[in-house]
Each structure stands twice: as structure tokens, then as C-alpha cells.
Amino acid sequence: MSGGVDSSVAAALLAREAAVGGDEVVGVWMRTHPDRGEGWEPRRGCCSTEAADDARRVAQRIGIPFFILNVEPEFGAQVIDAFAEAYLGGTTPNPCQACNQKIKFDLLARRAVGAYGADGVATGHYARIAHRDGRWRLLRAVDEAKDQTYFLWNLDQPQLAATRFPLGEMTKPQVRQLATEMELPTAATPESQEICFVPAGDYRALLAERMAYVGESGPIVDGEGRRLGTHTGFAHYTVGQRRGLGLTASEPHYVREIRPETNEVVVGSRDDLAARGFVADARHFVAGAPPAERFEAQVRIRHRAPEVNCEVTLVGSERMVVETAEPVWAAAPGQSAVLYLGDECLGGGRIARA
């Protein structure tokens, strides 16, 4: 229970089932990092003390036990530090996926079994689970605008088998309406779409605080190596970035590549960032195996990016080459490329290079 309306309604629906013979429900709020101190603090959101109070009040309202679970050390190492280290390596991380894979559906699930005797974990994610052909399948939510399977592509079979997504068949307006009808304290809580541990939305401050990285200035160059300007530290930039480059030109420049080894930021035109495919590493398939060594699918390279048809070719044990039917823009190393086939999220990988 994050303290938001989605997890509140998910808990309330399960509590309603429990009242007529369903599974017993326990509410858990996770403390992932300090609410204040160390020079930074999270905004009001899923990790603040206000959110914990909201979650507790919802649990009281629906009549279930409520616990606070401290996962601060694990979250710090596996999510926050990994996030910072990715930027220092010149890539763009996705911390929500790391949190889902390593904290919510792994650490929380294991702690829940040991501490509360739980059989599994339920969350307020907008996604669905089905059992087809002897395998657990991750399916898109009914509400396409809220679908969150992009953040769940790295879940495996045991995790899916022990997971419930009560909101998968609902739309966001239906969730809000139900929260109002149930008189949940979080019915009107606004959505939080920012990274919970990044102060004021500026990850540079986190790099300075967590990794003592203040940046070393270096050259901004074009594709031919000509110097166009000076950057404040390569980790302060991401592929696709346009603002904050400090360049004067008749046409806008976009970050095309980050080169930590030479402390260079490479820029180009918008067209320079269009690619007809990319290589991805750390591939994973939700069903435990790929459809084939070479197969057709749809791919999304960012949460809000449009899906495009593609052909996937497996290479070795961890890599895949994704050739797209139309150009994709700003395929950023470190970001996830998530594969779909119809309503099913097949899995994905992390972009290595366009």
C-alpha cells in the first residue's frame, strides 16, 4: 500500500473478497528511504510519511492489519545507487522497473512469506495475469492509457504465480469512483508520476549527494568530432535531451551519445537520433522462453513512446537485435525495450546501442 488511490482500491477489493471467504489480506507500506535528512527529501508521494499515514488510514477503514516494512538498505543499494551508477556509466536508467523486480515482487514477497505467512503479493498496478498453455502470461490492462506492463517486463514465472493485480480489468475513472463510494481517505489523492527519491525532480542533486559527483566540464561535439560547446559533466545529460545544452545554432541540437571514457557529449539533429533498430542486452521473457529464435512482435522503447512493429533476432544467451518497421527516435542506452504480441507483454531487454 503506497498511500495512493490505486493500491488503496486494490486492498479494498481484496478485503471485500476476504469478507465472503476470500484470502486474508494484510496491508504493508514500505519505507524505502529517509523522509528527511542527508540534504534531500522526497516529495509527498509513495515514500513520504504522509503517504504512510494515508495507507494506515485506508487499512483502518477497510479493516485489515497494517504494517510498515523497512527496506531502506536494499532499496538504497539496488535502486537508488544503481540509478546513480547508470548515469555515471553514461546510460539512462529506469528505477521503477528495478523497484518492481527487486523490491516489490522479490524482497517484499519473500519478507511477506516469512513475516506474515502470506502466499503472495497484490499491488495497484494496471496489468493483468492469465494462465495460457501451461505458462503464466503478463497481459495489458483494460485501461490502455494506464497500462503499466512496460514496468513489469522483467517479472518471472514464480513471481507472476504469486501476484494479484486487482485493477487490471478496471479503468482509472472506475477506480476513482469506487474509492469515493467506499469512502476511502485516498479517493482524491493526486497521482505521483515523478521518481520518488529524486529531490525536486533534479537527479543531478542526487548524483552529488549520493555519489559525490559534481561533474567535470568537457566538450560537446558533433558527429564528426567538431567541438560546439562545453558541458558541465557527462552524467548531467541523457540521449534525446534538447534543453540545457547552451548551444547557439539555427537548428536545435539533441544529445545523441554519451561518452564517459572521453568525457564527451555528442549532439546531432533530430533526424540523427532516428534509427531503424537497436541492440538490447539482458533480455528476459516472461513465459520463461522466447517465442522463437527469430520472431515478429511490437516494441516500445519508452513508457509513453508509440509501439512499432519489429522483428527480433536472438544473439547468444543474453542479446537480441530488434529491427523496426519504422524509425524509432532516441533509443537511449539503459532504457528498456519492451516486446508485445497482441495483448501479451512478452518481455524485453535493455537497450545497448542504436
Image: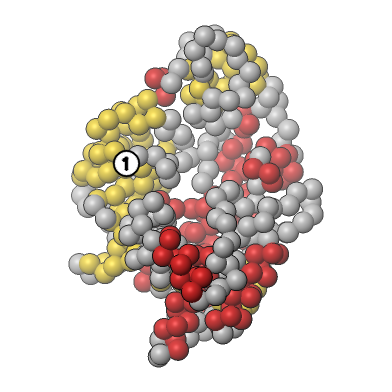
Of 89 and 138, nearer the camera is: 138
Residue 320 shows up from this direction: no
Is residue 316 placed above or below 77 in the rendered structure?
Answer: above
Q: Residues within 10 Å of mark 1 (few under 14, many from 20)?
A: some
Quarter of the figure with residue 67: bottom right
Color encoding of the figure = secondary structure
Q: Residue at x 69, y 46 (%)?
A: 199
Instruction: Please tell me which residue is depicted at 41% across the width and 54% down the height of the picture.
Output: 146
The percent coordinates of residue 350 (x first, y second) are: 42, 43
Residue bearing mark 1: 307
Q: Quadrant of the N terminus?
A: bottom right
- Seen at 74% across and 43% down, the residue is 209
Does residue 225 lie above or below 211 as drawn? above
Residue, x 45% and y 71% (percent of image)?
178
Looking at the picture, does residue 190 appear above or below residue 120? above
Q: Secondary structure at mark 1?
A: loop
Q: Is residue 174 left or right of residue 325?
A: right
What x and y, as percent, mark residue 140? 33, 57
Q: Position of residue 132 (x, y in %)?
A: 22, 67
Q: Amino acid at mark 1?
A: Glu
Q: Is residue 204 visible?
A: yes
The percent position of residue 331, horizontal first and vertical second, equals: 42, 33
Left or right of residue 134: residue 224: right
Question: Which image quadrant for residue 204?
Answer: top right
Lateral position of residue 341 relative to residue 19, left or right: left
* Along the viewing direction, whichever of 83 and 270 lies nearer the viewer: 270
